Image: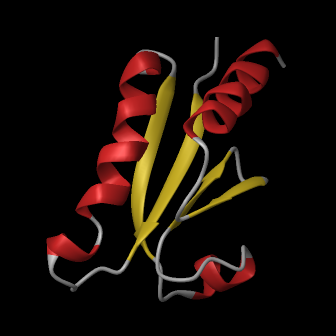
Amino acid sequence: MSKVKVDIFIPMGSCACQFSAFMDRVFAVLTKYRDQVEFDVKPSFSDEARKFKIGSKGLVVNGSEVFPEFFNPESLEKAIENALKA
C-alpha cells in the first residue's frame, strides 16, 4: 500500500512561535495515520507554495488537495482517509 504524501509549508527561518500552533494541529491529525502518511516540511515562500496559493502556512495532500493555515482537522482526516482508499 502506498503512503499518503503530505507537504507542510511553513515560513522557514522565522521564529518557531510563528508556526508552532499550526504544526501542533497538523501533527495531531498526522500521528493518527503515522504508518500510512509521509510528510515533508517545505518553505512557504517558494514557487511551489505559490503554485498552491499558500500564504505563510498551509499543507497539501497528495499534491492536489490544499488546506490553509486555519484548516478543519476533520477535513484533513477525511482527505487522508479518501486518499488511502484510492
Q: Nearer the viewer, residue 55 or 72?
A: 72
- Image quadrant in which you'd find residue 76: top right
**Model colouring:** secondary structure
Q: Nearer the viewer, residue 40 or 60?
A: 60
Q: Nearer the viewer, residue 75 or 11?
A: 75
Tell how many labels: 0
Depicted 9 relative to depicted 28: above or below: below
Depicted 25 relative to depicted 41: above or below: above
Q: Position of residue 29 (x, y in %)?
A: 45, 30
- Image quadrant in which you'd find residue 5: top right
User: Furthest residue to the right?
Assistant: 86
Assign the C terminus to one quadrant of the image. Answer: top right
Depicted 17 relative to depicted 32: above or below: below
On screen, residue 58 versus residue 21, left or right, reads right
The residue depicted at 25 percent of the width and 76 percent of the height is 18
On screen, residue 32 versus residue 82, left or right, reads left
The residue depicted at 53 percent of the width and 65 percent of the height is 69
Assign the N terminus to one quadrant of the image. Answer: top right
On screen, residue 67 versus residue 37, left or right, reads right
Q: Position of residue 49 (x, y in %)?
A: 60, 78
The residue depicted at 46 percent of the width and 35 percent of the height is 38
The residue depicted at 54 percent of the width and 60 percent of the height is 70
Q: Position of residue 20 (x, y in %)?
A: 24, 60
